[in-house]
Image: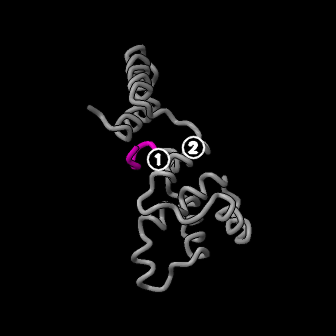
Amino acid sequence: MFSIPEIEKEMMALMQKPMSMANLHMFNELSEAMKNMGHVKREFTEDDAKQWVSHMDPQARWTMEQTTAVMNQKGYSHRPCEFWAVMNSLASDYGKTMAKFGADKPEVWAELAHDWLDDVDAEDHKVGRYWRDIVRH
């Protein structure tokens, strides 16, 4: 069984080759495999964010309104549902360590969420991919 990154890599390699009937058939097969695995590229939705945040352990600290307010204060322009999910996820995963070093402040989490979302060397749809491929559902 192939992983999604392996399938994507193979699809990219096929796109670099002349499109023969065999390559076209293989590309269609790989595309169908991705669809069947439920990993088609799509936008991360507010419903996805609500589901993710509702299952965080420890529980989410902030509402979407709160994270949107701090995002706006910082002058960041991310989708509110993505910023909310990422800021809470980071705090959920790294909160104990940040508290040990006195860095457990909403402004710090907002800057980390911005850095995570504004990652120039990441693939497109980072939040959606992380949600679908990493987060336990």
Amino acid type, label 2: Phe
Above or below, 18 against 72 in this view is above
Q: Quadrant of the N terminus?
A: top left
Confirm or deny contact between disc 1 and disc 2 (CB under 8 A): yes
Q: Position of residue 33 (x, y in %)?
A: 38, 25
Residue 16: give x, y in percent of width and height: 45, 33
Give the quadrant of residue 7: top left
In percent of the image, x 55 and y 71: which residue is there? 109
Left or right, 63 with respect to 32, comes to right
State the SS at label 1.
helix
Q: Is residue 111 left or right of residue 9?
A: right
The secondary structure type at the circle numbered 2 is loop
The kind of residue tagged 1 is: Trp
Distance CA(mark 1)–CA(mark 2): 8 Å
Q: Is residue 29 magenta?
A: no
Image disc number at residue 44: 2
Residue at 38% over, 41% down: 5
Q: Which residue is mark 1?
A: 131
Magenta stretch, residue numbers: 130-137
- The correct choice, above or below, for 30 with respect to 43 in the image is above
